[in-house]
Amino acid sequence: MKIKRHSRKHDTPLQLTPIAQVLQAALLLSVALAASPARAEDEDPAAEAQAAVSSGREEDEQQGTAGSATLLPTLTVNAAADSAPDGSAASGYRVKSASVAGFSEQDLLDTPFSVKVLSADLMKNHNVKTLSDLDKLDASVTSSIANPGWYSTPSIRGFSLDNTVNFRYNGQMMVNLQATGMENKERIEVLKGLSAMQTGFAGPGGLINYVTKRPTAAPLTEINYYVNEFDNTRGHVDISRRTNDGRFGLRINAATEEERSYVRSVDGERRFFALAADALLSPDTILEFDVEYERREQNGQPFLEADANGKLPSGFDSRTFLGQSWARYPTEYTMVSGKLKHFINDDWSFTFDGNWSKLRREQNMVWSHWGIQENGDSVTDLYYSPDQEANPINARLTINGRFDTGPFNHELAFGGMMHRLKQRWGDGYFDFLGNSNIYNPVSIADPSPDAPDARLARRVEEDGIFLYDVISFGESWKLHLGGRYSMRDERTYDTTTGDRDEQYKEYVYTPSYALVYKPQSNVSLYVSYIEGLEQGGTAPPNAANPNQQLSPLLSEQWEAGLKVELARGLNFDVALFRIEKPFEFKNSDNYYVKDGERRHEGLELSLTGKASPEWTIFASAMFLDAELMDASEDIDGNRPSDTPARRFSAITEYSPRQLNGWTFTGSWTYNGARHVHADNKGESAESYDVFGLGARYETKIGPAYTTVRLNLDNVFDKNYWSSAERYGLVAGAPRTASASLSVRF
């Protein structure tokens, strides 16, 4: 699709603020790393060849859909070392821009935040099926609450994400209370750290943004089939068409899956459908529209905890099913999303976007971890709550413009947003089910309990206005100044009587400052300061103050970073950060309280792209010093639970010249030891390494471009705890072999 392209008079870099000491050291490092400047894209012959294969990519990138117009896989992988950074395997999975860190698509080199973009090619080639698999793609992202049959909630920089505010669908809020299909996702953007400037109220860990596939410039038909050794099978079709004049495009993704987990008896069915459309209403106006529907029904694997002596279950087989065959977890999810963008002139545009979604689920959860004894004996409870609903609606108006004031150039974004959320649930049934053993589980009859109907339990209304100005002075400096004023009204209700339980209203201003310096066109350094705000936590049902909503939490983040585009097509990133957040926990009197703060200081390293025409590397590391400060005496100075001091992730691919079409892959994930309890007592979860191997072959059979993939995850069948929360121990997946076939016309 072609849309009128407007000249950009200023193409110098963007972004960030504080921590001056790092700037000097990083500048010296950048000189060494940038000794061989990256080749400009307009001098890149491989990029020109890729553009010839995929006509229309440039126009799609102008709409913020980089990579969506890729029509055919590149078969001559050896010649793609310098290909355009579109997220494809040929480009070393590099991506040039993202939208999660600002109010429009931004070049990552000019973005004053730590951002990782995970493309569809990367996720497909390395068997990423859910959010819980992201930990093998980025060291700063850790799996949390990732039990088979349930939805995943990753942590970023050691902080858990809020399932109602820290997730985005094409830039707008979505609830993450269900597993989300990846079939129609062009990429996943991960913003690390505070995000109040973009989102208002949100947890300090970061944002995860799903970006959907757009209609392609040329016709596309792709058929995918996946199977693993546990008989999990998935079929998926991806079809895109555009009218002859290019003004209207349509893309459909549909999938059906027989879900079979490595956990015995965790199975179910899944159906997925997504439609994406765009229309060029005028040379200056484009409309984008998405509809997504997904239904799943599966058993869930219950969580574990340390035994009565503080020890972790020893020798537990991750394939052992701790639940009950009748305890299903059906979910039904619908999302409708749209965006209208209009270019007023060469310098000004406005975007109106929004979404509406509805989640319906039945929570039929068996808890088998209470009072575990050394021999595995345990108490089993049942929580049953039917007809739960979450129904958010979001809208945002953003105006972007450029203007000059004397020697300064301004790139301005301002506007407002609206967020509404209603959640319904009932009191539910929570009671003793029977006795069991985690090593020899007992089958228990379904009590078929009655549970009260769901009622309005929570209502959130949030409005915000924002202003963000990027001021350029000279060819190398940019100052980012931003602020957001958020107004939040949250109410909770007694689901038995319907009476209001709690309410708080907050009117808060959160600033964001950043300074960016580019000594060369392929090097940027930044420092930044940002404040964030999130809703206070809710006391768990078993606390002495059950369901009490605590007051909002104000967080602060300082960050400094270096980004370099190296010569052959490698991107190297470094970030130093410090995040401070109030700490919430259950105290010795069993009250859920706010006391002291969590302080996370860390270093992130990332290397992505082509080390040579044959070698690809996608690697990252995080070193994290996390501590509880000024808290009660029994936990002051402790390390937060499930927070490793070191994490490493690395993926490498080798495409030998002698074996055209073949690529051999390897992966490694390291997770440091983690405390299970906030008091740092009892046994800790040990560090672990998990390795993976794989191969894929790309060829052309008649008119079809065909790719066969083989993967072996956890090659050495390592036993480990993928999540190590006190009441959320999750055993990692065993060795798993899988295969997939993609045929593209």
Image (spheres, grey):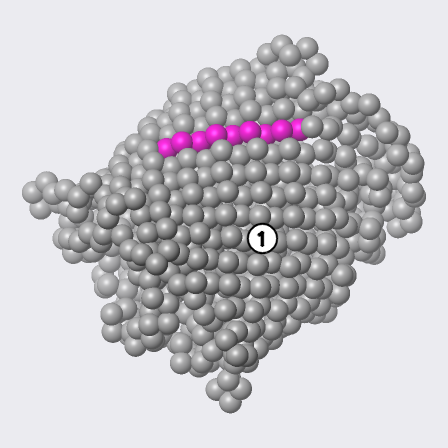
Q: Visible in this render: residue 665?
A: no
Q: Choose between 561 and 148: the one closer to the eye.
A: 148
Which SS type dominates the magenta stretch? strand
Residue plotted at (68% across, 54% down): 257
Q: Visible in this render: residue 231?
A: yes
Question: Is 409 colored magenta in this rendering?
Answer: no
Badge 1: few (under 14), some or many (20 or more) residues near its Cα, within 10 Å? many
Q: Which quadrant of the structure image shows residue 2?
A: bottom left
Residue at the far left: name it.
406
Residue plotted at (72% across, 53% down): 259
Q: Choose between 30 and 439: the one closer to the eye.
A: 439
Position of residue 238 measured from the top left corner of the image (x, y, whole percent): 53, 58
Instruction: Tell me: residue 91, above or below residue 358.
Output: below
Q: Choose between 660 and 379: the one closer to the eye.
A: 660
Three-letter amino acid code of the residue under disc 1: Ala
Position of residue 731 measured from the top left corner of the image (x, y, whole percent): 74, 52
Label 1 sits on residue: 254
Q: Choose between 94 and 395: the one closer to the eye.
A: 395
Magenta stretch, residue numbers: 388-396
Position of residue 38 measured from the top left corner of the image (x, y, whole percent): 29, 70
Q: Is residue 239 left or right of residue 575?
A: right
Give the SS element for disc 1: strand
Question: In the rendered image, which quarter contains the N terminus?
Answer: bottom left
Position of residue 296 measured from the top left corner of the image (x, y, whole percent): 68, 44
